Image (spheres, helix red, strand yellow):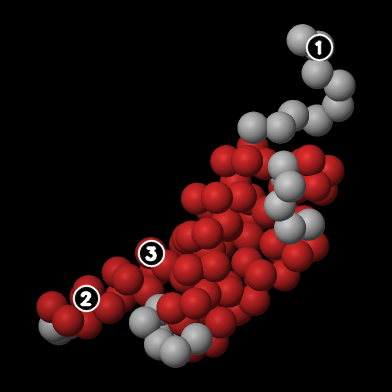
């Protein structure tokens, strides 16, 4: 039987893990030129940041730990700031 605290911890862990996976996969599928065009850090830079965040969350298994919290923050920054800027740009020539 799982206590309420244990259940909250499991939900927090899997939610932040899903968030980090989403950020990493999204950074992987976006074109590299879009990061530069949006004035953000390069694609390899964001892939490294989100990938390390994912590994830290898997390794620490505690999103509220000393290293887990910055990993969650890095994933949230990508999804809230970088993803909308990069997503708004399209591949190839745009016909206005």
Mark number displayed over residue 7: 2
Separation (CA) of disc 1 from disc 2: 51 Å
Nearest the viewer among 29 and 36 is 36
* Residue ID for mark 1: 95
Check disc 1 and report its element: helix, strand or loop.
loop
Q: Residue at x 56, y 82 (%)?
A: 56
- In percent of width and height, residue 51 lies at 66, 70
For marks 3 and 2, give the one nearer the viewer. Answer: 3
90 displayed left or right of 80: right
Is the residue under label 2 in contact with that under label 1 (CB below 8 Å)?
no
Residue furthest out toward the front? 39
Crowding around mark 3 (Cα neighbors within 10 Å: few <14, some 14 to 19, many 20+) is few
Which tag, 1 or 3, sits closer to the chain's start?
A: 3
Q: Residue at x 52, y 59 (%)?
A: 77
List the residue tagged with mark 3: 15
Residue 69 figure quarter: bottom left
Q: Which residue appears farthest toward the right when viewing the image? A: 93
């Amino acid at each position: 039987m799982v206590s309420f605290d244990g259940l909250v911890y499991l939900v927090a862990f899997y939610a932040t893990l899903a968030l980090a996976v989403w950020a990493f996969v999204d950074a992987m599928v976006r074109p590299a030129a879009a990061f530069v065009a949006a004035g953000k850090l390069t694609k390899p830079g964001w892939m490294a940041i989100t990938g390390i965040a994912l590994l830290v969350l898997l390794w620490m298994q505690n999103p509220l730990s000393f290293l887990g919290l910055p990993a969650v923050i890095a994933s949230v920054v990508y999804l809230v700031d970088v993803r909308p800027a990069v997503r708004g740009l399209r591949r190839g020539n745009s016909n206005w």
